[in-house]
């Protein structure tokens, strides 16, 4: 067992819910501190109710638990952020700067700050979007991710802070519902299918987007964080690819299990966000630097989601 104390901020969200048990298995339940604005439905291990926009609350938790690593998962996501851009910007930036500054002052060994494919915008190539494509995001969420990438690089260069990052694609998991992103349909559709209900999709049927099953995302995160420091060459954020599919592809994949499953397409404001994002991602640099390789394709992910959700609903 490794001697580290890990703080996960935003631990009740889609990623945190799935990441916590993995971190507890590696470092021990008593070495992982979950923190969030709201208490979790079920507390598993140490929990701190904390607002990461408040530097003093964050500092107090870091010092009291003698934290050595921080996973900063608190954010307002792409679709939700568009309802109140200034609020989303303020929350995303305040929490980020608090985490970086508290990490610097308290000599935190490693920090994880996720980015997103939302960092890319209209002028990046849509297919096989390269690591170094131009970043001209269309959402306030994307703008906050580009800023976060640059702040992370700055803290690394100026202060030597070991901050690491991945540009996650849309993440698909059964452990909890997603928190207001543009790829949320790819989780909600499974909940409808296993309950025998039709699904109304907020993206059009041919909207191709980069996606990833949560198992792959967690493995990527832990592999990145475990990699020797000299292997981490990108200090903004690494491109990361799993699979790309459209709502029509996903529906067809689900219909191999539920032939009568019906989907109606009714695109809303999230269509424009999706249209500004890459369709496929080139993650050659992550593969080269620290050996990234995805395991889940569309059929395998569909099978896992249906198996896991069928047991929780029945
Ligand atoms: P989520 O919305 O599901 O969870 C975020 C959590 O942060 C929530 O539990 C919320 O209560 C908490 N939070 C919000 N404000 C807080 C504050 N001030 N202090 C403490 N906690 C606060 O998000 P997620 O899907 O788990 O995403 C985690 C990170 O990964 C985010 O940075 C997100 O941008 C990034 N990301 C996620 C996806 C995805 O598909 N889920 C894709 C790309 C990037």
Image: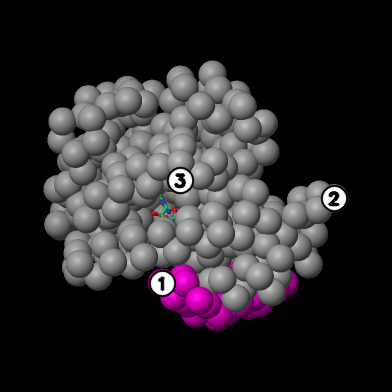
Q: Which residues are magenta?
A: 34-57
Q: Residue at x 55, y 80 (%)?
A: 49
Decide if residue 300 is on the left or right side of residue 271. Answer: right
The way the protein has been coloured in the rendering is one colour
For mark 1, give the secondary structure: loop
Estimate the x, y position of residue 157 in percent, counting from the top left.
46, 37
For the residue pair 179 and 229, the one nearer the viewer reads as: 229
Q: Which mark is residue 185?
A: none
The residue to which callout 2 is attached is 1
Marks 1 and 3: CB-CB under 8 Å? Answer: no
Callout 3: few (<14), some (14-19), or many (20+) C-alpha neighbours within 10 Å?
Answer: some
Displayed quadrant of residue 6 = bottom right
The residue to which callout 1 is attached is 53
Whether residue 104 is situated above or below residue 282 in the rendered picture: below
Q: Quadrant of the C terminus?
A: bottom right
How far apart marks 3 and 2 lie (CA) works out to 29 Å
Q: Is mark 1 within 8 Å of ligand 1?
A: yes
């Amino acid at each position: 067992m490794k001697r580290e104390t890990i703080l996960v901020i935003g631990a009740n969200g889609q990623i945190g819910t799935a990441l916590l048990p993995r971190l507890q298995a590696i470092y021990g339940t008593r070495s992982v501190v979950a923190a969030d604005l709201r208490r979790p439905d079920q507390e598993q291990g140490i929990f701190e109710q904390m607002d990461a926009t408040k530097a003093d609350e964050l500092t107090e938790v870091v010092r009291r638990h003698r934290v050595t690593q921080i996973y900063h998962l608190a954010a307002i996501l792409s679709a939700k952020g568009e309802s109140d851009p200034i609020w989303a910007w303020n929350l995303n930036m305040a929490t980020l700067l608090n985490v970086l500054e508290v990490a610097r002052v308290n000599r935190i060994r490693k920090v994880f700050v996720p980015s997103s494919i939302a960092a890319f915008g209209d002028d990046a190539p849509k297919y096989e979007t390269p690591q170094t494509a131009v970043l001209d995001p269309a959402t306030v969420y994307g703008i906050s991710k580009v800023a976060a990438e640059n702040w992370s690089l700055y803290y690394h260069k100026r202060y030597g802070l070991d901050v690491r990052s991945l540009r996650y694609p849309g993440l698909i998991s059964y452990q909890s519902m997603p928190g207001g992103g543009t790829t949320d349909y790819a989780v909600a559709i499974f909940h409808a299918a296993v309950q025998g209900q039709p699904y109304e999709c907020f993206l059009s049927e041919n909207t191709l987007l980069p996606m990833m099953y949560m198992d792959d995302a967690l493995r990527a995160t832990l592999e990145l964080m475990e990699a020797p420091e000299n292997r981490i060459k990108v200090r903004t954020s690494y491109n990361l690819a799993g699979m790309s599919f459209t709502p029509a592809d996903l529906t067809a994949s689900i219909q191999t299990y539920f032939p009568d499953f019906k989907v109606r397409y009714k695109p809303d404001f999230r269509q424009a966000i999706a249209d500004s994002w890459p369709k496929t991602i080139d993650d050659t640099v992550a593969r080269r630097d620290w050996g990234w390789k995805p395991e889940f394709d569309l059929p395998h992910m569909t099978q896992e989601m249906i198996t896991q959700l069928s047991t929780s609903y029945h």
